[in-house]
Image (cartoon, rainbow, N blue to C red):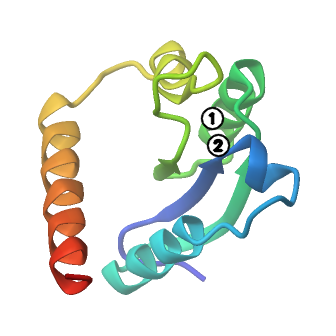
Amino acid sequence: MTSRLGAALVITLSDTAAAGGREDLSGPEASRILTEAGFEVRAVEILPDDRPAIETRLRAACDERISLVVTTGGTGLSPRDVTPEATLAVIEKSVPTVNLRLAQARSALRAALADEHE
């Protein structure tokens, strides 16, 4: 199937989820949002927080002509959270405005969820 926006890949980066220790909720949700937006989501994958594995998968996605790769997880401050570093090693250009907008949306979502539980 060809979509109007192209192929997308969703990758959740988590040692725990990769080992089967917790269910990945963010990957399927990202897939749903991308599908509704018009992307053809080819896969939702889970990888451990392993920089070489992340870099390898991101490069393979380019070879597969994936138009958009969405990663979730692996962005904390522990030594194992290496998603930003792995991504920067692979991309040709960073789009800081997109990163800023995503961070703002995430903050707004957290605030809304916190209000719901009060």
Kind of residue at badge 1: Leu
Kind of residue at badge 2: Ala
Tag 1–tag 2 contact (CB < 8 Å): yes
Q: Secondary structure at mark 2?
A: helix
Q: With respect to residue 66, does 114 lie above or below?
A: below
Image coords of residue 38 (percent x, y): 37, 80
Q: Is residue 44 left or right of residue 18?
A: left
Residue at which label 1 appears? 58
The answer for how far apart the CA atoms under marks 1 and 2 are is 5 Å
Q: With respect to residue 18, does 38 lie above or below?
A: below
Image coords of residue 99 (percent x, y): 22, 38
Image coords of residue 75 (percent x, y): 46, 33
For residue 36, which quarter of the picture?
bottom left
Image coords of residue 6 (percent x, y): 45, 65
Number of numbered discs on residues:
2
- The numbered mark at residue 72 is none
For residue 115, which quarter of the picture?
bottom left
Residue at which label 2 appears? 61
Q: Nearer the viewer, residue 5 or 72?
A: 72
Within-10-Å neighbours for mark 2: few <14, some 14–19, many 20+: some
